[in-house]
């Protein structure tokens, strides 16, 4: 799909009611008219995406109940301000986290939940704080919106998608969808910014040729090197043929664990409070596995065999975020949290260098 659809707009109009008329009129006009998908507000897709909207709805309902006048305007302001899809995803994740703790401590007067708490005598603010214990407990939400390479890759995928759809929608028999994945390095392993663009016309022709063979997975090769793949599937969801790409845009060539590690360290350096209990939440929207997060936070896994006993032993390199943070003297990160949109199914990795009270874990979980 190149443009937003009438069915999507209808859903957005219905779901926009959760904001009680607070969305500005000029933004409503943008949301209610067909737009190029790449240029549409991120809010549009959150409101019509069946994987995201139920969690956003639940969070906003909890926020309204906890403190309507204070926090609903904050929700609207954040969603309007962070309009592009990357920034918007992090904003929605933050709203879901805030809503989760508002709901959890709705009837518990011993814990106060503060969203965007200003830290006294500093210019810092923290995303979500649980107050009432010996120390504030902070959950800082972060994402990948600042990474320029990811944005460039997203735009490249969109251009490929557009060119595929221009051609396949000319065909009389609309019966397939095309799920593609493109490389971001030349076949010889050398990085080259936007190198794939010159191959887009050939890739589109390759897809049209592969279509004649029917359903299946096909590899687009140049000089014996695979530069892209496409899976031709039965048409789903729509009446017209469409192209889409795998949502995971943090793939192996980006060295996931190192990039996660850098995000954790940067957050500790620039945002966290040295005297508080700090957790960093990273929405796992790109299907990282547990090992990526563990290696990013704790260090790269090492295995070795004892020559005498022939037993396999396990340790970690001292290259994890906890080691760097400790060495640099940055504020401590007590744990990393990650999940998909359903924050209630989150996973946590606790800093083994710090003794953490079990009550803190019970409050976080």
Image (cartoon, rainbow, N blue to C red):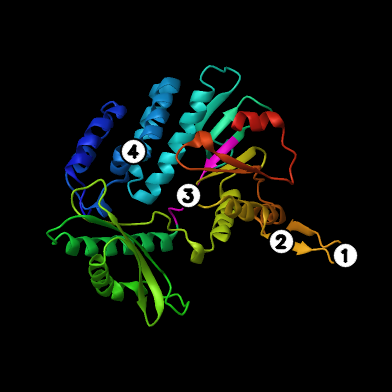
In 3D space, how far apart are the residues under numbered discs 2 and 1 (Cα atoms)?
Answer: 19 Å
The residue under label 3 is 143
Residue visible at 43% across and 45% down in the picture? 90
Of badges 3 and 4, the one in the foreground is 4
Q: Residue 130 at what x, y percent from top left?
A: 58, 29
The residue under label 2 is 302
Question: Of the residues under marks 4 and 2, which one precedes in the sequence?
Answer: 4
Range of residues picked out in magenta: 138-146
Residue visible at 25% across and 52% down in the picture? 235
Secondary structure of the residue carrying numbered label 3? loop
Secondary structure of the residue carrying numbered label 4? loop
Estimate how packed mark 3 is, as few (under 14), some (14 to 19) or many (20 or more) residues with alpha carbons within 10 Å.
many
Q: Is residue 53 left or right of residue 265?
A: left
The residue under label 1 is 308
Q: Is residue 214 left or right of residue 316?
A: left
The residue under label 4 is 50
Q: Which mark is residue 14?
A: none
Residue that sits furthest to the bottom in the current view? 223
Asked if one can make out residue 193 in the rendered structure from this viewpoint, the answer is no
In 3D space, how far apart are the residues under numbered discs 3 and 4 (Cα atoms)?
Answer: 21 Å
In 3D space, how far apart are the residues under numbered discs 1 and 3 (Cα atoms)?
Answer: 46 Å
Asked if one can make out residue 231 in the rendered structure from this viewpoint, the answer is yes
């Amino acid at each position: 799909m190149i443009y937003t659809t009438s069915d999507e707009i209808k859903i957005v109009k219905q779901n926009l009611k959760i904001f009680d008329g607070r969305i500005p009129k000029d933004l409503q006009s943008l949301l209610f008219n067909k737009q190029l998908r790449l240029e549409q507000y991120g809010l549009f897709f959150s409101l019509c995406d069946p994987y995201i909207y139920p969690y956003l709805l639940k969070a906003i309902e909890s926020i309204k109940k906890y403190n309507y006048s204070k926090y609903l305007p904050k929700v609207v302001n954040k969603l309007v301000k962070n309009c592009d899809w990357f920034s918007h995803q992090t904003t929605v994740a933050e709203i879901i986290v805030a809503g989760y703790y508002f709901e959890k401590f709705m009837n518990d007067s011993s814990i106060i939940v503060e969203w965007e708490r200003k830290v006294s005598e500093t210019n810092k603010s923290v995303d979500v704080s649980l107050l009432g214990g010996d120390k504030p407990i902070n959950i800082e939400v972060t994402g990948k919106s600042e990474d320029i390479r990811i944005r460039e890759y997203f735009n490249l995928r969109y251009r490929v998608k557009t060119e595929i759809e221009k051609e396949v929608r000319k065909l009389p028999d609309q019966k397939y969808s095309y799920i593609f994945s493109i490389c971001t390095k030349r076949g010889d392993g050398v990085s080259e910014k936007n190198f794939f663009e010159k191959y887009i016309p050939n890739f589109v022709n390759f897809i049209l040729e592969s279509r004649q063979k029917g359903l299946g997975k096909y590899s687009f090769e140049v000089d014996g090197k695979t530069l892209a793949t496409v899976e031709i599937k039965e048409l789903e969801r729509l009446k017209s043929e469409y192209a889409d790409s795998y949502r995971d845009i943090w793939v192996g060539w980006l060295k996931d664990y190192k990039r996660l590690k850098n995000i954790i360290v940067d957050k500790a350096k620039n945002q966290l409070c040295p005297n508080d209990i700090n957790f960093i939440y990273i929405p796992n929207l790109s299907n990282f596995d547990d090992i990526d997060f563990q290696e990013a936070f704790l260090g790269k896994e090492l295995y070795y065999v004892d020559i005498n006993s022939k037993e396999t032993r396990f340790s970690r390199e001292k290259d994890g975020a906890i080691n760097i943070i400790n060495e640099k003297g940055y504020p401590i990160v007590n744990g990393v949290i990650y999940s998909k949109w359903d924050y209630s199914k989150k996973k946590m990795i606790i800093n083994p260098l710090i003794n953490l009270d079990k009550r803190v874990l019970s409050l976080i979980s």
